[in-house]
Image (spheres, rainbow, N blue to C red):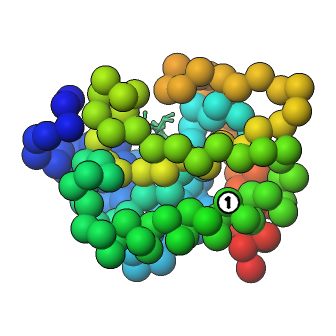
């Protein structure tokens, strides 16, 4: 999947947005959905996606992008206060050669903890749902 091409309405995140696939939700409004990454690179790895379809950052409506990054900041602040990481990576990949594996725009929020190794991107182990739900509950409480 290169940078160009049509949006695939059957990508995993489109299915999550339609409710055809489950997710461990953190936040939702009319424009944005945020949920736990099921192959987390670290404890609290969270995704933030726009509801409006686009493949990557380059083909996204600028207003959608503005709203998305603002929500990403708010959710990152909630992760900071709830999970108390020592650092936070915020990242985003465009095109398969850049590391993108799901072709619906998303930001990754990846907390970093001193002395804790980062799992590899998109090749990690699937997390236990109970564990993800516990982390999501803490982040959601900090969003209120
Ligand atoms: P990227 O490689 O930047 O496109 O990121 C896609 C991310 O989605 C990876 O970090 C995957 O672990 C994550 N992912 C894949 N399937 C799911 C799913 N069903 N629910 C939550 N996260 C997912």
Q: How many marks?
A: 1
Considering the numbered disc 1 on the image, is that residue within a helix, a strand or a loop? helix
Q: Is mark 1 within 8 Å of ligand 1?
A: no
- Name the residue nearer the viewer: 18 or 65: 65
Mark 1 Cα shell of 10 Å, populated few (<14), some (14-19), many (≥20): many
Residue closest to the far left: 6
In the image, 20: left or right of 135?
Answer: left
* Whether residue 75 can be seen here: yes
Quadrant (top left/top right/bottom left/bottom right) for the N terminus: top left
Q: Residue at horizontal 33%, vertical 39%?
A: 94
In the image, 22: left or right of 3?
Answer: right
Q: Residue at horizontal 37%, vertical 66%?
A: 65
Can you give x and y, in whole percent of width and height, for residue 58 in the image? Answer: 26, 52
Res 75 quadrant in image: bottom right
Q: Which residue is mark 1?
A: 76
- Name the residue nearer the viewer: 31 or 19: 31
Can you give x and y, in whole percent of width and height, for residue 85 in the image? Answer: 83, 47
Q: Residue at horizontal 75%, vertical 58%?
A: 79
Residue 5 versus residue 14 in the image, above or below? above
Can you give x and y, in whole percent of width and height, for residue 81 in the image? Answer: 84, 63
Quadrant (top left/top right/bottom left/bottom right) for the C terminus: bottom right
Residue 119 versus residue 64 in the image, above or below? above
Residue 125 versus residue 108 in the image, above or below? above
Can you give x and y, in whole percent of width and height, for residue 12 in the image? Answer: 34, 43
- Name the residue nearer the viewer: 72 or 37: 72
Q: Residue at horizontal 45%, vertical 67%?
A: 68
């Amino acid at each position: 999947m290169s940078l160009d091409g049509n949006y695939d309405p059957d990508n995993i995140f489109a299915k999550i947005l339609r409710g055809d696939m489950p997710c461990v939700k953190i936040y939702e409004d009319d424009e944005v959905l945020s949920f736990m990454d099921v192959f987390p690179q670290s404890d609290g790895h969270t995704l933030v996606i726009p509801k409006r379809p686009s493949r990557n950052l380059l083909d996204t409506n600028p207003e959608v992008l503005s709203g998305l990054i603002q929500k990403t900041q708010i959710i990152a602040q909630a992760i900071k206060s709830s999970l108390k990481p020592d650092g936070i990576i915020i990242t985003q990949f465009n095109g398969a050669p850049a590391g993108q594996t799901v072709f619906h725009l998303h930001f990754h929020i990846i907390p970093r903890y001193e002395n804790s190794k980062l799992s590899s991107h998109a090749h990690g182990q699937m997390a236990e749902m109970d564990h993800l739900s516990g982390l999501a509950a803490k982040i959601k409480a900090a969003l209120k």
